[in-house]
Image (cartoon, rainbow, N blue to C red):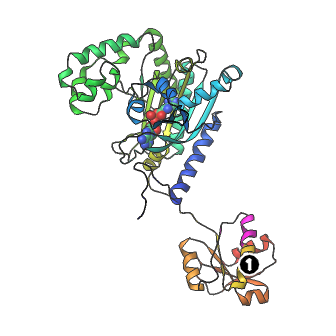
Amino acid sequence: MKIPSVKGFRDVLPNEAAARRILIERARAVLESYGFGEIEIPLMERGELFARSVGSTSDIVEKEMYAFDDRDGTQIALRPEGTASVVRAYLEAGLSRAMPIARLYYLGPMFRRERPQKGRFRQFTQIGAEFLGRDDAEADAETLCLVADICEVAGLSGYRIEVNSLGDGECRPAYREALVEFGRARLADLCDDCKARLERNPLRLLDCKNEACSAVTADAPMMIDHLCEPCRTHHDRVLQLVGELGVELTHNPRMVRGLDYYCRTAFEVSAEGLGAQGAVGGGGRYDGLVAELGGPQLPGIGFAFGLERMQLAAGDDRPELNLDIFVAPMAAEAAGPAMALARRLRREGWKVEIGASDKKLKAQLKRADKVGVRYAILLGPDELESGRATVRNLGARSDHPGCFALDATAEEIGRELEGTN
Ligand code: HAM
């Protein structure tokens, strides 16, 4: 009996992996052009790290985290996101002193036990960035500009960046109270989830997908109308700067994000072609997080994109994994020389597959066709005897094969291959 994969955990086959690598290279290039350096963080952390940052009442921590007790009793969690880990690593390495302004990016799998569907998995891959140490609106504007540039290089069609301000410790508590009061007066009309979390996490009321809840909250108070003066000024300045950079933003007063550490600027990126799972990326400012995790009062802003969703949104133009050369040994005694030749060609940067000498030439050439190579190099008893390998250009389908001496230089071989065009 076959053993299936775990629900929500998927394999990335070579074509998709190749497309993903291109996407990653492009995103990395943009991140590095903005001065971000890569940080590698572990897949597992202490569970309390996420409870204290993402929030113990967030869906991510409350319902979706893969958490277990290690043999020594330590509570472990598979990371559901990267921001908390980056801040932990930054503090643990003493970087808040050595590098009070830091631009870090990361890449890798995250784990959330959500209900799997198109674009939503239990293991997914994020590329994310954290910009620590700056609380000015210019840092937000630069971050949003970076987000737009990543969308561009990823080829996301019709992407939209929605922004909101979530206020701060000054103005949010009063707003929160106003929202709870609003919800209490309409409790009977809310879905069970919203009823249950109204007192603990009222902001989630605003992005509940339940139609009845959306109707109820159509005229709910919005954070944007309750911002304190400094938050208002910050927000206006961000919008002004981003406008000047020519990056288009859409204001969405209902956007609240599912992680608790945010303040002020929050954003989500959507793209066409994703259906219900609209967000390809999201992020925002988190000025209290570093202190919350035991560090100094240091601000930060960041974002993460989901690579699977980016690939879905960018369409299905996956590059084929094209090889250059197929080496076909046509007798057992040709296998050794064929392998040596393939190795030499590989060292010169050619992508080479080699067949098995016990297969008929026809079968080997069929395989060569399948892997999309342009050239087949044939090596049988005659070639060994003459010391010259036969070359066929599979694209040209010509009956005039070329040949080259088995001790030819890579350059000479290259010229011979080109010559068969
Ligand atoms: P997030 O919005 O929870 O933010 O996740 C960012 C992105 O990860 C989403 O927009 C989505 O593309 C992808 N993603 C999330 N869950 C899934 C899933 N189950 N399946 C597939 N893709 C998924 C964060 O994680 C924050 N740490 C971002 C951030 C960085 N904020 C500040 N700095």
Ligand 1 within 8 Å, label 1 CB:
no
In this view, the residue in front, 126 or 192, is: 192
Residue range of the region highlighted in magenta in the rendering? 342-356
In this view, the residue in front, 8 or 387, is: 8
Q: Secondary structure at mark 1?
A: helix
| Kind of residue at disc 1 | Gly
The percent position of residue 178, horizontal first and vertical second, equals 30, 12
The percent position of residue 417, horizontal first and vertical second, equals 70, 75
The residue to which callout 1 is attached is 336
- Inspect the magenta stretch and tell me whether residue 83 lies in it: no
The percent position of residue 156, horizontal first and vertical second, equals 46, 45
Location of residue 331 (image quadrant): bottom right
Location of residue 192 (image quadrant): top left
* Whether residue 246 can be seen here: no
The percent position of residue 32, horizontal first and vertical second, equals 64, 38
- Inspect the magenta stretch and tell me whether residue 344 lies in it: yes
In this view, the residue in front, 93 or 314, is: 93
In the image, residue 400 sits, relative to residue 370, either above or below, namely: below
The residue shown at (28%, 24%) is: 196
